[in-house]
């Protein structure tokens, strides 16, 4: 089985974790894809209400999922948003960063869908 | 903690508001076929089932991503330790701050594992250490019991000898000094 890594995703960990089992790999990719829209919507809504604690909580919860999909670049961005929300500092940057996260996540999801296609 | 025999599996509760994390943990630990799992999205749901007497609880530190009012891991840890002091709790968190880890250990957590791609093997090792600790504690308790019984038997023997000596029943026995 060959899955190409994209520019954002790196499925090395997931493949190792699932011992190369395509069903398991697909299951986790689908879970990520299925939840990512809601997570981004939550972040946007919370930021628009200036509910920084909620932004912090969502960032904290989604961070490992990005790690497992090998999306290291966005892990750093999520950390920055989480830190800003946690300390309520540079909060004016948060909506911009969430927009970046949304755009990059859309690309990552596209790459993950391509990986799914190569699995089936 | 239950012995890890096929008929007597170790009961593990996973408390995490992240469904993917819970699934992955369960998948990873299922390889060892010695665990029975139950998972809960909040600490409150886990507390409701504490009377099922879990051996181990893997508890996320932050549990408020779905329910904003949900208690955090520290509060749940304190409640678990209050109600079931023998249940071991392993904290799992995205927080890699040392003071957070120390705080959870202060409140009785067995260990603290940071979420990420190394967390699964780390948890496996922590559970292995936990099983080993429980086995050692069991052995120690057995040796303590044996020591107490031996000491009691020796004391009774001395009392019997003193009694017999006092009654003048053993001075003429062969071998008596």
Image: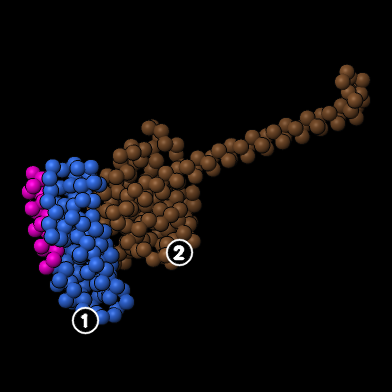
Res A76 quadrant in image: bottom left
Instruction: Tell me: A96 left or right of B8.
Output: left
> Residue at left 35%, top 40%?
B35
Corner quadrant of residue B98: bottom left
Q: Which circle marks residue A92 in the picture?
A: 1
Q: Is residue B176 visible?
A: yes
Looking at the figure, which quarter contains the C terminus of chain B?
top right
Q: Residue at x 66, y 37 (%)?
A: B147
Q: Which chain is brown?
A: B
Q: Please identify the dominant SS of the magenta region.
A: helix
Query: Compared to A8, does A29 lie above or below?
Result: above
Q: Chain of mark 2?
A: B
| Closer to us: B65 or B79 | B65
Q: Which residue is mark 2?
A: B103
On the image, the x and y values in percent for residue B36 come to: 34, 41
- Residue A110: in magenta span: yes
Q: Chain of mark 1?
A: A
Does B74 appear in magenta?
no
Region of the chain picked out in magenta, as a range: A103-120
Image coordinates of residue B5 in percent, x first then y, are 41, 33
Q: Which chain is blue?
A: A
Q: In front here: B77 or A68? A: A68
Q: How is the image coloured?
A: by chain
């Amino acid at each position: 089985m060959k899955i190409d890594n994209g520019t954002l995703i790196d499925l090395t960990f997931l493949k190792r974790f699932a011992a190369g089992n395509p069903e398991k790999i697909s299951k986790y990719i689908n879970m990520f894809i299925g939840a990512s829209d809601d997570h981004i919507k939550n972040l946007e809504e919370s930021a628009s209400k200036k509910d920084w604690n909620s932004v912090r909580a969502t960032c904290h919860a989604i961070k490992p999922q990005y790690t497992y999909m090998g999306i290291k670049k966005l892990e750093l961005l999520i950390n920055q948003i989480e830190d800003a929300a946690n300390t309520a500092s540079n909060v004016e940057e948060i909506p911009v960063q969430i927009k970046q996260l949304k755009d990059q996540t859309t690309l990552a999801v596209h790459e993950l869908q391509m990986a799914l296609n190569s699995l089936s | 903690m239950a012995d890890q025999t096929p008929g007597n599996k170790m009961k593990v509760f996973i408390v995490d508001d992240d469904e993917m994390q819970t699934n992955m943990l369960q998948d990873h630990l299922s390889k060892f076929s010695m665990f029975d799992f139950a998972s809960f999205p909040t600490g409150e749901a886990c507390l409701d089932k504490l009377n099922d007497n879990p051996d181990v609880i893997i508890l996320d530190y932050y549990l408020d991503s779905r329910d904003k009012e949900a208690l955090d891991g520290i509060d749940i840890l304190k409640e678990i330790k209050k109600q079931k002091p023998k249940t071991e709790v392993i904290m799992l968190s995205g927080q890699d701050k040392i003071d957070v880890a120390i705080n959870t250990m202060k409140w009785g957590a067995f260990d603290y594992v940071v979420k990420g791609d190394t967390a699964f093997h780390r948890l496996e090792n922590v559970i292995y250490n936990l099983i080993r600790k429980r086995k050692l504690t069991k052995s120690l308790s057995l040796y303590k019991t044996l020591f107490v019984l031996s000491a009691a038997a020796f004391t009774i023997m001395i009392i019997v000898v003193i009694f017999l000596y006092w009654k003048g029943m053993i001075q003429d026995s062969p071998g008596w000094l």
